[in-house]
Amino acid sequence: MVGPRVANTGGSDDGSFYMAGVYSLLGDPDLALNVLERTAKDAGPDVLQWLSVDPDLDTICDHPRFRELMK
């Protein structure tokens, strides 16, 4: 179980992207994608490119929401 302090990952800082990777590795794709969707909209294209090759996100890279985010 993730505590509320950790689960509150709004904003577009690197910590939010890190937490998305943690949630992905823990097997919680919905929480990982929620974090990514909130933070990626403020990120530049270079950040999205990095996300597309981040091994921590391998468990969600085929998810339709992740593919939509990468467009």
Image (cartoon, grey):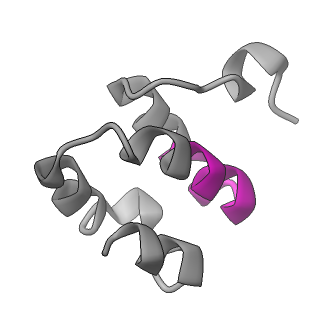
What residue appears at the point 42 percent right and 58 percent down from the top-left corner?
A: 56
Q: Is residue 64 magenta?
A: no
Toward the viewer: 67 or 56? 67
Question: For the magenta stretch, what is the residue range?
Answer: 20-35
* Residue with the most extreme right position: 1
**13 left or right of 24 in image:** left
- The percent position of residue 31, horizontal first and vertical second, equals 71, 51
Q: Is residue 13 above or below residue 39?
A: above
What residue appears at the point 34 percent right and 28 percent down from the top-left corner?
A: 14
Chief secondary structure of the magenta portion: helix
Q: Quadrant of the C terminus?
A: bottom left
Residue 68: name its quadrant. bottom left
Q: Is residue 2 above or below residue 45?
A: above
Toward the viewer: 2 or 62? 62
Toward the viewer: 59 or 35? 35
* Residue with the most extreme top position: 5
Q: Is residue 28 above or below residue 71?
A: above
Residue 33: name its quadrant. bottom right
Q: Is residue 25 magenta?
A: yes
* Residue with the most extreme left position: 46
Residue 17: name its quadrant. top left
Q: Quadrant of the N terminus?
A: top right
How many numbered discs sit on the rendered protein? 0
What residue appears at the point 30 percent right and 58 percent down from the top-left corner?
A: 51
What residue appears at the point 36 percent right and 23 percent down from the top-left corner?
A: 13
- The percent position of residue 55, horizontal first and vertical second, equals 34, 64
- The percent position of residue 36, horizontal first and vertical second, equals 50, 49
Q: Is residue 45 above or below residue 59?
A: above
Toward the viewer: 60 or 43? 43
**54 left or right of 29 in image:** left
